Image (cartoon, grey):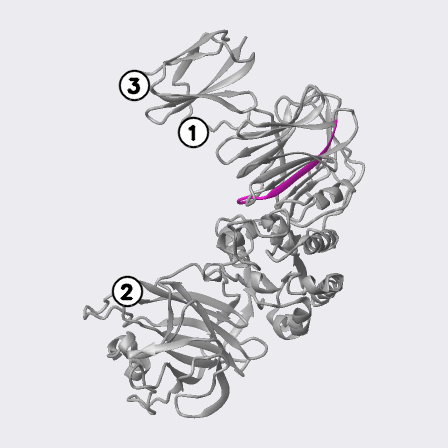
Amino acid sequence: MKKTIIIFSISLIFNFNHSQTKEQEFLIDFGPNDIINGNATTNPDSNGNYWNNFINPVLSSQITLSNSVNTLTSYTTEVTTNFLTNGILNGGLLAPNSALIGDLAIATATQDYFYATNKSTLEFKNLNVNRGYEFKIFASRNTTSIRETKYNFIGLNDFKDILQTSGTDIGGNGYHGNTSIIFSSGIIFPDCNGTIKLEVIEESGNFAYLNLIQLTEYSDVAYTIDSRLRIAYMGSSVATGWNAVSDHGYAYQYGELLSDRYVNNSSVNDWEITNISIPGNSTTDVMSRWNDHLVPECNKYNYVVYALSLGNEDVKTEGITAFNRFRDNLLTLITNATNAGMTPIIANTYPSRQYDATEYNFLKQINLLIHQWDVPSINLLGGLDDGTGKWVNGYWDDDWHPNTIGHTELMYTLVPSLFDALDSGKAQPSKISNTYLEMGSSVTNNQLVFTPQNTIHSFTNSFDIKTNSTGNIAAFTTSTGDVGYLSIDGSGYLKYTSPAGIEITGSTIVNDNQWHKITFVHYYARGKSFFYTDKAETGNHNEQLLCDHFYLHPLYAPTTVDYRDWFFYRSAMTGDEVDGLNDGLMLKSSLELYTPLDGQAIIGIDPFVNLAQSTNTVIQELATTLGIKTSTKSKPFFKAFPNPITNTLNIVPLTPGYSIHKMEIINALGQRIKTKNNSDTKEIDFKNLDKGLYFIVIHSENEQVSILKIVKN
């Protein structure tokens, strides 16, 4: 069996004891009974066991289970998403070997199957909630194509893994299908309603298979809740992963991120995510099924993410009525979760290609409200908004749903350490007044550095400044080592210098010794950046940034400058949200950093304290030239003369055999202004360059790197 990482990890520790008792066993044969492609299993079989024959694969088909000694029970198995059937002439295992699969080697059970083209589901109902159930599955299809099926069990605990059903001639007899491997789930406990759901998912090869199941019931199986913390997604189709490959939508991808953080010791918690979202659900639907599906007293979820759409609320036809119902029902759902001992999180509304300007305005209004609620929230709209409330081109699958990469953009809007912060008891942030930090090159040579956790795509970076000087006020570096700057030019205007060297200047004086809010908004999928001075958009630029570090007070800062209220969001903001920031609103959706920059020690001794619900920190370090990538191999293998330089700089190796592959000339702002390859002369003409500090980055043929500091007179 091919193993994969279990993303929705088992949430319970099972303590099997010596008194564990096997109560009964059930055998189920899936497939047609038409002689040509399959046959029902005759009872009893050659081993004396009785089988249940599940022949009809369509929605709501159901059988009542008899156990292997032919005792009828109240347990049922029901198709909850359509399957198809086939077998015999289309690849079922006709001659199973009992030496390989034991009592399951019954030809009428292995020769035919149910199959799914993407994902189909069964539910095992009316099970005993005080017992545990082990599922063993055999599936096989004769084809040289590699095909894998994922079996995902959802009950009180969850389990998923993969079985390769096809593509290998394991027995050397020309049969290119599984002949010997039996999938085992371990013990699964029913939910509070006595139900275990089985999802049969195509993992690779376009088809997923189910030939037979052996279901064993155990009593006297002790279990205890372990230290894993449980998150439930309760929403509609986008939350389920609709139209993402293998339904691996943003919730699933965030589960993978949390698992990776735990494995890499970035998180102390081994989180488990369970998705109980249902396509098409409105807030009314979620309220009606809340008690039955969330069942907090049984499943003991620690957190619930409500992830719903204004589209399902019928905002296009009902307008403000739908808006108000959506708002009021969400507030009720928040209260329900809080009263049940769970922490609610709200996923804000997201785009649709069906929305017009009116619906877009409703989206922006409800999101601005959710921003201010006293619950954690996620700004999904800012990940994929094309500026009109529609999905960005290339990131959608149909009018109402993103494609896989669109889901990834939504996932990036979630703060990676949000649940770690919640588990530590970190409170919702509140706006702090009367704080600021005195900086400026006449005060300190330090810069402030913020590094978002994990990958960042769309973002909003906002802070306040007060100065009467000029210079660099903020910067960011990209994954390629390039630098973008926000600065105040000689005329007192805000200027953006992009990592590509494009300069855009605003029209508002910002060095008038008054407080100004500077906000930089980047839409990654849309490929566009905007910067604002206070409420006014003072420039925009088409670009796609992949940033890794953000700075305040970088090298060549104003002589004197005060900073306050540094906000960083993992999502882009609309103009309405930027206005809200300027109006003093405490906006919190996708907030990863909020430091008031408390130089007055109003809230404590740490002037850089981060009040956002994340575990991120701001560090203070000596301001240096940004954007120059060095390595442990960086040594002075070359020398440059004369230095200081006026006209021509000469580069010579200090060690024989070190020839130059490439040279890069970088100015004090970290911008690459010239590159010379190995066919060029080892002289650099400085005559037309401005006076100041430069860095020469030399890449030698043997992969060594040298960085030389040069002063131009």
The mark found on residue 654 in the picture is none
Dot 2: within a 10 Å radius of its alpha carbon, few (fewer than 14), some, or many (20 or more) residues? many
Front-most of residues 486 and 642: 486
Q: Which residue is mark 2?
A: 167
245, above or below 131, in the image: above
Which callout, 2 or 3, points to the residue nearer the camera? 2
Residue 26 in the image: x percent, y percent? 41, 84
Pick out the residue farthest to the left.
Answer: 173
Q: Secondary structure at mark 1?
A: loop
Q: To which residue does mark 3 refer?
A: 657
Residue 421 at what x, y percent from top left? Answer: 64, 51
Tag 3 secondary structure: loop
Which mark lies nearer to you, 2 or 1?
2
Residue range of the region highlighted in magenta in the rendering: 454-466
Residue 633 location, x and y as percent?
40, 27
Residue at the (29%, 63%) spot, across then down: 145
Dividing the picture into quadrants, the one containing residue 325 is bottom right
Which residue corresponds to mark 1? 632
Quarter of the image with the C terminus is top right
- Amino acid at pointer 1: Thr
N-terminal-most mark, 2 or 3: 2
Inter-mark Cα distance, 2 to 1? 46 Å
